[in-house]
Amino acid sequence: MTTLVWFRQDLRVADNPALAAALESGDAVIPVYLFAPEEEGAWRPGGASRWWLHHSLARLHEDLAARGSRLCLRASTDSSSELLGLIRECGATRVVWNRRYEPAIIARDQHIKTALRAAGIATDSFNGALLHEPWTVRTKTGGPFQVFTPFWRHCKSLDDPAPPLPAPAAIPSPAHWPQSAALDSFALLPEVDWAAGLRAAWVPGSAAAHRALQRFLTDAFDAYREQRDQPGLLGTSRLSPHLHFGEIGPREIWEATRRFALDRGQHTTWRDSQFLAEVGWREFAHHLLYHFPQTPEQPLRANYARFPWKRNEAALKAWTAGLTGYPIVDAGLRELWHTGWMHNRVRMIVASFLVKDLLVSWNEGARWFWDTLVDADLAGNTLGWQWVAGCGADAAPFFRIFNPTSQGVKFDPEGSYVRRWVPELARLDDAWLHQPWAAPAPVLAAAGIVLGEQYPHPLVQHDVARRDALEALSAIKAT
Ligand code: FAD
């Protein structure tokens, strides 16, 4: 007997419940990946995600090959027919996979399950992506949570997630392998090579994910609460793209954190650590996406659908290019463009600037992030943008408007982040670094800066923009 293991966003061999279930049956196993971007609906992978996916698939193939197996690749516009074709080719009797939670994918998977079962094929799906399935976490009245703190408190009161499954030593092969497409035929890598910055910043794949986790635990876990908001430090785990593609699972992170803390005598504090709470935010994001599937496009708070956003192509373009004249905003957007990632604190600052200073809709920002982030994730991106825009669950209220200058001073006090990503300001004194427009002319001259030439004048005046934003807010409150 043969089982197809359909890999999706679970590109790992360890702690992979679908793979483990296939192996448990003793069947021959055919690992398959179907590249079917059209089936992702409006959210097919952007440029940076495609780059990551290429390398992640290559690493998964190597990890499977080391166990005597391989990854069968197919491009498809109809995964249901593709799987049925593969089943015919190799005589498989069962297909297993780990679940995803994006609305278009839930609908597709339901359709595929029905089609396979109608054809007499057994199917099983598993939880490989979350600590707790979204439908198992409920408020006292049985509904979904909409506030993070009680959500996470409730999650922590549930049984601990099952320990992660070990990587298999060997994977039994079928007598005949079905044909596989070449990875290059998916054309995931850019035609014009803009990915040098991504290559310099990242190593996709499970082995690198585990190295990143160990680096984080050893070097940054203890100081995480104090340092996680400082973009100039390596204070966070940088696991987000690895988690998105499933190169590492949250159960592995939970268990590694528990062990790390227990080994050092921290018997009670690890569960309440700020780091696991952030992994909890990831759970919360998936919980919300599952229960409120309209939110990638629609605000959770329906009245925000009437918010008078501006169409301002020039401002949006300056924002995407990191040329707003606000150094911390520009640094973040340039970090994103070069590395495919941006520090969480800076994501909040740049998002707030777009939505509240420029009054450009959060949907536009979410789209830009979608194309440029290596960790672009429908749950995380939707939660992040709606949180900042004040229109989501447990969101920052719209009227609390970040001041990009004081945020810069507070979270990049020595300016190392801004100096790295906005090198034209590198010689400017700390005192003026986050507000070059206010610097005396001789100070600017000594730093080699002429505003409007090397570095732009501010796109808007923050205090004026703030007033306009509050006025726009009162328009939806009044209706
Ligand atoms: P760490 O601080 O080390 O946290 C560990 C893990 O917890 C992360 O890898 C991530 O999986 C999860 N996590 C941490 N913070 C959050 C959060 N606020 N919400 C959800 N999960 C979180 N995250 C994405 O994975 N994909 C996105 O597309 C995405 N878009 C965002 C857009 C905006 C506007 C904002 C404000 C945040 C967004 N985030 C997104 C959340 C967050 O910025 C990143 O998860 C985080 O910066 C990743 O860095 P890290 O791995 O070093 O995180």
Image: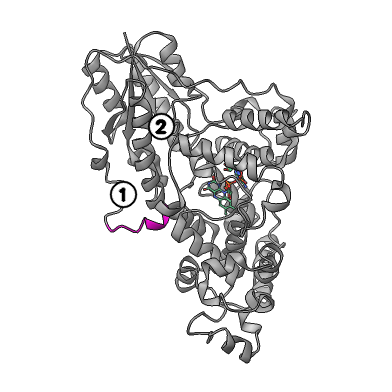
Mark 2 or 1: the one toward you: 1
Residue shown at the point (41%, 15%) measured from the top left: 22
Q: Position of residue 319 (x, y in %)?
A: 50, 68
Q: Position of residue 246 (x, y in %)?
A: 48, 34
Label 1 beta carbon less than 8 Å to ligand 1: no
In the picture, which quadrant includes the C terminus? bottom right
Between residues 456 and 223, which one lies in front from this camera angle? 223
Quadrant of the image occupied by residue 154: top right
Image: 12 above or below 200: above
Residue shown at the point (34%, 14%) measured from the top left: 172
In the rendered structure, which amino acid carries the disc numbered 1?
A: Leu
Using a 10 Å C-alpha cutoff, classify the residue at mark 1 as few (fewer than 14 neighbours), some (14 to 19) or many (20 or more). Answer: some
Residue range of the region highlighted in magenta in the rendering: 192-198
Tag 2 residue: 8
Is 193 a magenta residue?
yes
Label 2 beta carbon less than 8 Å to ligand 1: no
Using a 10 Å C-alpha cutoff, classify the residue at mark 2 as few (fewer than 14 neighbours), some (14 to 19) or many (20 or more). Answer: some
- Tell me, yes or no, if residue 292 can be seen here: no
Secondary element at tag 2: loop
In the rendered structure, find residue 189 and report the number of the disc placed on it. 1
